[in-house]
Image (cartoon, rainbow, N blue to C red):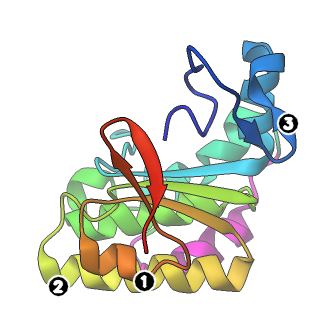
Amino acid sequence: MTLLAGLDTPSTGEIELLGQPLSQLDDDARAALRAESIGFVFQSFLLVPSLTALENVLLPCTIRGEDEDEERGMSLLASVGLTGRETHLPSQLSGGEQQRVAIARAFMTKPRVLFADEPTGNLDQHTAATVIDLLFSLNRDHGTTLILVTHDPALAERCHRTLHINAGEMVEAA
């Protein structure tokens, strides 16, 4: 996933992201492409502990040097079922709530592509199912391309296209 998102560069071959050959972009250009068009949801949430749920959702705006769209942030938190939890710190939220904040944050900048790395890996089965339903629903509603990394075959079955890495080779599932 880090190669596909332009976080790392391959030693051989070429990766194209949104029509841009990543090997032809310098670090700043790859970072700009990610900031403009890419969202991330990680297994470990990666919320800033000293920021509230709303502040974590608004963080991509701050990083991009844009005005914080609090109305959109509140709307995204509502869409993930966190109305009334906007002022809570991550330590005051359950794991499922933290992941829902991370999902809202990922959609804050209206990404064209969303990378989700084991988004349910740290969640119990029931919470994981809720988070995945939410992720697929938001993905559909926002028209985002979702690239999901998972070891869960049931989750992989919900995707339109499934690729496996086998002995270093990427192969399409039958």
- Depth check, front residue: 22 or 81: 22
Task: Decide whether residue 70 is among the magenta residues.
Answer: yes
Identify the image quadrant of the C terminus: bottom left
- Tag 2 residue: 126
- Region rendered in magenta: 67-85
- Depth check, front residue: 150 or 61: 150
SS at badge 1: loop
- Given the image, on which type of amino acid does mark 1 rest? Arg
Q: Is residue 76 left or right of residue 170?
A: right
Q: Is residue 2 above or below residue 139?
A: above
Q: Residues within 10 Å of mark 3 (few under 14, many from 20)?
A: few
- Which comes sooner in the sequence, label 3 or label 2? 3
SS at badge 2: helix
Q: Is residue 25 above or below residue 161?
A: above
Q: Are marks 3 and 2 in contact (CB under 8 Å)?
A: no
- Tag 1 residue: 158
- Tag 3 residue: 20
Q: Position of residue 77 (x, y in %)?
A: 52, 74
